[in-house]
Image (cartoon, rainbow, N blue to C red):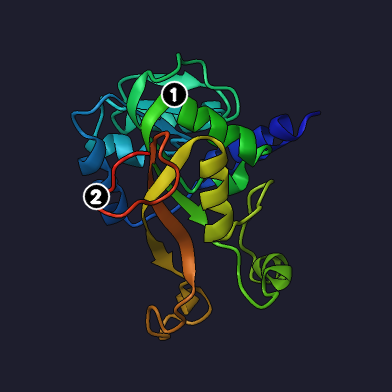
Amino acid sequence: MSRIDDSRQGYDELHKDQGFSEEPEYYEVVGALVKGKKSVDIGCGYGFIEMYSPETVAVDFSEEALKVAQQNGARQTVKAPAEELPFASDEFEVATSIGVLEHCADQKKAIQEMVRVSKIQILAVHAKLPYGLELVRRPLIKFFGLKDQPIEDPLTMKQIKQLLKDAGSRVIVEGFWNYIDLRWLWKKIPYSLVKWPSHHFVIAIKTPNLERKFLGENER
């Protein structure tokens, strides 16, 4: 069984069980950004973006995820892995990938495909923990009885920007999607007590100008 097939099987099981719990406000913002645009949501999961932008094409390699996305309003669903998108080059104005890249079997290929089919890319990517803490993340998840995905390869912001640059896209906006929330250990812990990002957030654009230039600088 390939790494993608193995991941798909595990992902299907997660969606058959209880899926994922998310704060809707984040997806409402992204939905507002893509609403009215020709857009594609790569790794749509439950279709949280499609709740606010139902015309966005919802793509996932999980049949179980697509069933839920349809129930949540997705008008067009496509079953495909992020690494093999069945679309023409430059078919979309905007592509989103929210909490997906860290679960891809081939992150470089997934980014190349995302950039190939779209002009603008919006991503939230699981952040790699600092100080070697990534080594203890999985044992802690197992200890507290939480479920992890079959593939979990978080990235640094530097890695994300390099992957996009290699694919011909430049990051215009960078920030974080959310903080690591220690309240799953103890609900009385204040939110954002620890300022490590849970996910990096970027907006990038496909362009031949991959290096930042001074405002008004002419091409040489």
Side of 148 relative to 87 (left or right): right
- Residue underneath mark 1: 117
Q: Is residue 216 left or right of residue 141?
A: left
Residue at image location 68% in from the left, 47% down from the top: 151
Q: Residue at x 41, y 49 (%)?
A: 171
Question: Which of the image's four quarters has the N terminus?
Answer: top right
Q: Position of residue 35 (x, y in %)?
A: 21, 34
Check the image and report above or below for 220 versus 28. above
Residues packed near mark 2 inside 10 Å, few (<14), some (14 to 19) or many (20 plus): few
User: Can you identify the residue that label 2 sits on?
Assistant: 29
Element class at badge 2: helix
Q: Residue at x 49, y 35 (%)?
A: 168
**Residue at the extreme front:** 220
Q: Where does the C terminus fall, quadrant-wise?
A: top left
Q: Secondary structure at mark 1?
A: helix
Crowding at dot 1, Cα within 10 Å, few <14 / some 14-19 / many 20+, comes out as many
Could you say where residue 169 lies in the image, as x and y percent from the top left?
45, 39
**Amino acid of disc 2:** Val
Q: Is residue 144 above or below residue 1?
A: below
Q: Which of 215/70 is in front?
A: 215
Q: Answer with the quarter of the image where residue 72 lies.
A: top left
Q: Amino acid at mark 1?
A: Val
Label 2 to label 1, Cα distance in Å? 22 Å
